[in-house]
């Protein structure tokens, strides 16, 4: 039986481990603190269309493929774990001014060119869907096929699925991939991946989020994911069973997961501009994570050498793309690179970035 | 040996228990969660002068007596616990507009009438003392004798002092004072005191605070306690070893210690108006407590019947007044009511408020 080490026990690592184990590998996950990193802090939007931007066609293609993978992935995960994960069925991006409204039309036309049918809404259309939104919202873009998941339920479900599939999760830190005796290695260490494969073009992108809890007597949260831009800053609100996740700030700050006063201030101000009732919600949690960013916002998914496979660099979209990543990894381990996997192939970056760690040390 | 039950293990209850034990009582403290209530959330200002207001002469008199008690109280507590508690030596109240500046002069003149010498500072005088304050600060009132303590160190010190004095702390809830077999009872249950003595004029006053942690490379916090009024809301910033406590919102909200989005938003905004650099601080904690308020902002300190003594209703000033309360209780247990204790005598309220709980049930 072939042995596989998965280095990193975030959502991506666990999903890869689960699916590899189901494909016949004997899998061990290594993470000093499994399920506690960026995926624990995530919002859980599955919104590659709403997040798309003209020119980023490859990001859209990879994200849309991941979204298409989610129903089957989610259903298998639910079946094996008993956990239901979806918290919203649609995504609504709103505009507060004329420039934002024009952007929504631009994005909608660009998406239509790829066959994605999003609906542009006027003021009345937005309010009919989500009456709790601010009266200053003047337009919207409705993505009827973009749901959201509760990231922490996904993590619970993945841990249960891993356990059921016989994956061993070891709370250990790996300092060198060469130390692992396994036949193959998947590097899924998120923002820390470049520490194990120096030169790998993945860096920490700090993001802060708030978790707001609904209180009795206060207006309930929107049913849909709400996205907007306020004072030039993107903000999103993702429903939860008991409230909303508000995200996310974005800083190039190195490995820093400190929640700052200014970050919390901005998130509250931006969220209140869109959803005026949230002042009465409980501020249940403020947290920060290090998202694994890449230069082109696509993951690094594919072989780094004969033994090591990268499954990292999922950026702000790990919850979305893990479904596709987990489906692709068993084939990649067998040397099969499908066209969609090609989009995320590490070899799109210069070879010197991807030299083996032995060569760099 | 006489036995004493202290109902309530907040700062006041622990301080009373310690001093009573030192006076020869066999003391048991009852609290389901000792040292976790309003005193855990407090800012720790010892500022009866800066907080004074013309007309509240009795509050000033009691508070000033408590402040005078603190040096000896604090030194005894330090000696027995090894804990040093002071985090600031002075208090500076600042004005952002002409009306606030006029108020500072009014308070200063009123205080001078009682022999308290506070210094009114102009813009330059304030900036010379505390250069990190906003340039919009136009006047200040410096209380050179008003320090601040770290409330959590005070709680630790009191627990150590109680242990050293042989006080037994039981994590038990008391539902009826009649159930206690002790010779005497001190009711120090804070905002919950009226549940044990129905009609007692003490109610919960919700207050939220933030704890901000200084980060490397960011301007350090002021050396003094800073108080101000922003948009009509009082705000204070109390130094800590590693940052600042920002307080406090104030609501009549019943027993509710939920931290709200709006409360955090206001505290950040008001603090930033005074201290612009704090956006870069870490938001380390947001918390809420139920202060035990009374109708006239003086505690309830004295006999309720032959057996039960009240030591409650310390409102927002528990950290200040506990020093005096703890000093007075041993004498009060012996039936001696000094003039300063008279100020806080429960009998200043109508007799029907203070009827024994047996009569009310």
Image: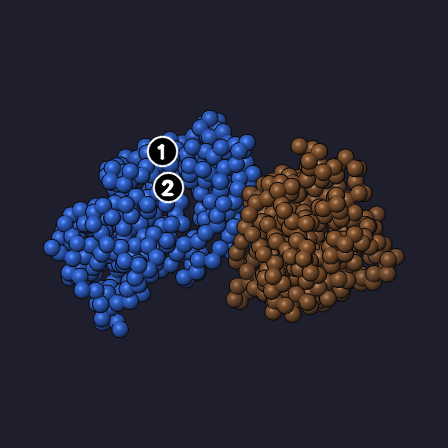
Chain colours: A blue, B brown
Residue B99 locus on image (x, y percent): 78, 49
- Quickly name the residue at label 2: A150
Q: Is residue B273 visible?
A: no
Label ID, residue A24 = none
Quarter of the figure with the C terminus of chain A: bottom left
Front one among A208 and A214: A214
Front one among A137 and B65: B65
Q: CA distance from mark 1 to mark 2?
A: 12 Å
Above or below: residue B132 compared with residue B306: below
Label ID, residue A89 = 1
Residue A143 locus on image (x, y percent): 36, 34
Q: Is residue A222 visible?
A: yes
Q: Quadrant of residue A252?
A: bottom left
The reply, left or right, for residue B91 in relation to residue B210 is right
Above or below: residue A220 compared with residue B83: above
Residue reaching furthest bottom? A361
- Structural crowding at the residue carrying mark 1, measured as other residues with C-alpha within 10 Å and reported as few (<14), some (14–19) or many (≥20): some
Residue A61 locus on image (x, y percent): 27, 44
Q: Chain under label 1?
A: A
Q: Residue at x 14, y 49 (%)?
A: A24
């Amino acid at each position: 039986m072939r042995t596989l080490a998965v280095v990193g026990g975030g959502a991506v690592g666990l999903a890869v481990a689960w699916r590899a184990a189901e494909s016949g590998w004997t899998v061990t996950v290594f993470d000093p603190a499994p399920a506690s990193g960026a995926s624990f802090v995530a919002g859980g939007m599955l919104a590659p269309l709403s997040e798309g931007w003209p020119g980023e066609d490859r990001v859209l293609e990879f994200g849309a493929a991941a979204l298409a993978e989610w129903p089957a992935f989610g259903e298998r995960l639910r079946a094996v774990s008993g956990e239901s994960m979806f918290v919203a069925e649609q995504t609504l991006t709103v505009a507060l001014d004329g420039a934002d409204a024009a952007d929504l039309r631009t994005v909608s036309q660009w998406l239509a060119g790829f066959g994605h049918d999003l609906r542009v809404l006027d003021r009345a259309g937005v309010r009919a869907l989500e009456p709790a939104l601010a009266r200053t919202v003047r337009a919207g873009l409705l993505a009827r096929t973009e749901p959201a998941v509760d990231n922490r339920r996904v993590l619970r479900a993945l841990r249960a699925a891993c356990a059921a599939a016989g994956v061993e999760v070891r709370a250990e830190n790996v300092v060198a991939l060469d130390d692992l005796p396994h036949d193959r290695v998947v590097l899924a260490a998120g923002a820390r991946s470049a520490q194990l494969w120096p030169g790998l073009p993945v860096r920490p992108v700090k993001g802060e989020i708030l978790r707001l809890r609904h209180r009795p007597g206060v207006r309930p949260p929107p049913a849909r994911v709400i996205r907007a831009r306020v004072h030039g800053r993107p903000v999103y609100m993702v429903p939860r069973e008991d409230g909303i996740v508000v995200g996310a700030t974005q800083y190039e700050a190195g490995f820093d997961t400190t929640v700052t006063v200014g970050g919390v201030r901005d998130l509250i101000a931006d969220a209140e501009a869109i959803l005026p009732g949230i002042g009465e919600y409980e501020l249940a949690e403020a947290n920060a994570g290090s998202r694994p960013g890449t230069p082109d916002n696509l993951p690094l998914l594919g072989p780094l050498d004969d033994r090591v496979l990268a499954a990292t660099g999922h950026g702000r979209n790990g919850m979305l793309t893990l479904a596709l990543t987990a489906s692709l990894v068993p084939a990649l381990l067998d040397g099969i690179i499908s066209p969609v996997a090609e989009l995320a192939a590490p070899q799109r970056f210069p070879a010197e970035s991807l030299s083996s760690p032995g060569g760099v040390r």
